[in-house]
């Protein structure tokens, strides 16, 4: 690291940026995604408090490349157990905001990613950190069981 520089990690994309502490943070931009780091430092959009919808098109960017661990819910609108788990995942997204991202992928609309992860039953919850699958849970489980499942990363 350069002398006198501090490092600010962009919460939008996770890139570590060297910033001169003597210059206004409002002028600093992320070298990767080009978002203002001052906005990133004060923004809550980088740490969503609700599940985010992901698709085949943005799965790699939003899940695999995420600086935070991601719990991906593979679901479908017609699935009763999926609807049963949904409120629990909403609560967990809020509870673990800033430490974990909860993402939802509709398997009917995004078959490629579902096939890549060999999802054959829904709901399937897959915990991904640093691009790697850490664990998976198949079926509608209770909140305490899901929280135990998450305990390895939060």
Image: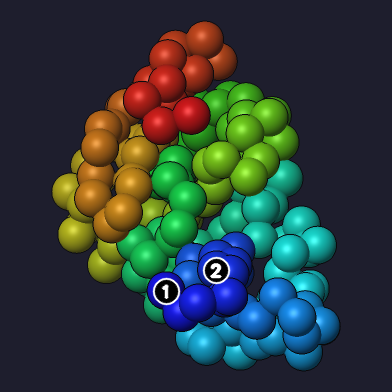
Contact, mark 1 vs mark 2 (Cβ under 8 Å): yes
For this view, does 24 lie left or right of residue 62?
right
Mark 2: secondary structure: strand
Residue 75: image quadrant is: top left
Please name whichever residue, 108 or 88, is drawn nearer the observer in this view of the structure: 88
Who comes first in sequence, dot 1 or dot 2?
A: 1
Let me know if residue 69 appears in the view: yes
Using residue 57 as the reference point, say whether residue 40 is left or right of it: right
Query: Residue 55 is drawn in which quadrant?
Result: bottom left
Towards the viewer: 101 or 76: 101
**What residue is shown at x 28% (from left), y 57% (from top)?**
131
Q: CA distance from mark 1 to mark 2?
A: 8 Å
Query: Which residue does the image show at 70% across and 85% down from the upper left?
Result: 28
Q: Is residue 136 above or below residue 51?
A: above
Dot 1, crowdedness within 10 Å: few (<14), some or many (≥20)? few
Q: Which mark is residue 124?
A: none
Q: Where is mark 2, residue-wise?
A: 7
Q: Which residue is mark 1?
A: 1
Q: Position of residue 39 (x, y in %)?
A: 79, 73
Q: Looking at the rendering, which quadrant does residue 73 occupy?
A: top left
Whole-percent x and y of residue 116?
19, 59
Q: Position of residue 148 (x, y in %)?
A: 42, 14
């Amino acid at each position: 690291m350069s002398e006198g520089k501090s490092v600010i990690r962009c919460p939008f994309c996770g890139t570590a940026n060297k910033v001169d502490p003597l210059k206004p943070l409002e002028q600093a931009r992320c070298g990767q995604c080009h978002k203002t780091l001052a906005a990133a430092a004060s923004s809550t959009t980088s740490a969503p408090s609700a599940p985010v919808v992901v698709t085949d098109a943005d799965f790699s960017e939003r899940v695999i490349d995420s600086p935070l661990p991601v719990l991906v819910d593979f679901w479908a609108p017609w699935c009763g157990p999926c609807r049963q788990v949904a409120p629990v995942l909403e609560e967990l997204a809020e509870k673990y905001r800033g430490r974990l991202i909860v993402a939802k992928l509709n398997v009917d609309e995004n078959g490629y990613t579902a096939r890549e992860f060999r999802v054959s039953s829904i709901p399937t919850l897959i915990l991904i950190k640093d691009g790697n699958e850490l664990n998976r849970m198949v079926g509608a489980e209770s909140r305490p069981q899901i929280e135990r499942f998450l305990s390895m990363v939060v």
